[in-house]
Image (cartoon, coloured by chain):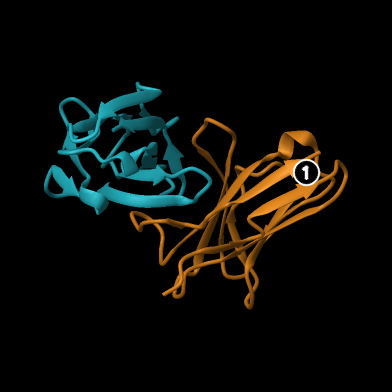
Amino acid sequence: AQSVAQPEDQVNVAEGNPLTVKCTYSVSGNPYLFWYVQYPNRGLQFLLKYITGDNLVKGSYGFEAEFNKSQTSFHLKKPSALVSDSALYFCVTLMDSNYQLIWGAGTKLIIKP
Amino acid sequence: NAGVMQNPRHLVRRRGQEARLRCSPMKGHSHVYWYRQLPEEGLKFMVYLQKENIIDESGMPKERFSAEFPKEGPSILRIQQVVRGDSAAYFCASSPGQGAETQYFGPGTRLLVL
């Protein structure tokens, strides 16, 4: 069965420092991987996705993610964190059915000024 | 191009009442998905619909819950005889197709059952 794991419940980063939010996946076949962000009391916003091609995927708001097949990881990164990046981040994969999104538990990112 | 619209944003119901949640997909999108989110958790798939058809409702409880996506108008998620355990955030998403197509989410409806 397809699944993703986010090993950290919370990540704390000082403003201006690089940030990494970790995700590992377990999928059969070609992995389809996404990152979504949820701001407090708001909907979910799509950040980026990996389908095929370049292992480094660039997304919205300066975020990028690196697909690593040997480590089965898809970590989210940003070179310089902003306080406004503080939110809940979800790593997501696609079920075999090709329409059910399977969600990680989420990682709360806190950026301190 | 407006995004996915959901209303109401907040809904309070007493036990035993009915809850109706509405979702208007993005223009040009004919695929609608409903997900439920409990506090501090990721989303759980409930149902996938295309116009006038339920494609997969395997994530939806068999009793009290129903969904539709009529030819005209928004998709409706209906919960009859609500119980406290139904309190959650319900998100709707839409996409132009399935597979690796990105699903775009609405702001959600937060249901509170008293």
Look at the numbered disc 1 and give the secondary structure of its residue. loop
Q: Quadrant of the C terminus of chain B?
A: top right
According to the picture, the residue beneath numbered tag 1 turns out to be B63
* Residue in front for this viewpoint, B65 or B104: B104
Left or right of B8, for residue A60? left
Mark 1 residue type: Glu
Q: Is residue B27 at least partly visible in the picture? A: yes
Residue A70 sits in quarter: top left
Chain in orange, by letter, is B
Name which quarter of the figure residue A5 lies in. top left
Q: Is residue B76 left or right of residue A21?
A: right
**Residue at point 49% right, 43% down?**
A40
Q: Residue at x 46, y 66 (%)?
A: B3
Residue A81: percent from the left, percent from the top? 23, 38
A12 over A27 or under it: above or below: above
Q: Position of residue A12 (x, y in %)?
A: 31, 25
Name the residue located 53 percent from the left edge and 30 percent from the top edge: B40
| Residue located farthest toward the front when viewing the structure as drawn | A113
- Above or below residue B71? Residue A30 is above
Q: Position of residue A83 (x, y in %)?
A: 31, 39
Along the line of sight, the residue nearer the viewer: A87 or A113: A113
Number of dots carrying numbers: 1
Considering depth in this image, is A69 or A17 the residue closer to the camera? A17
- Chain appearing in cyan on the rendered image: A
Of residue B62 and residue A23, the one placed in the foreground of this image is A23
Q: Is residue B30 toward the left or the right of residue A56 in the image? A: right
> x, y (%) of residue B57?
62, 49
Residue A51 seen in the figure: no
**At x 57% / y 52%, what residue is drawn?**
B108
Neighbour tally class for label 1: few under 14, some 14-19, many 20 plus, Cα within 10 Å: few
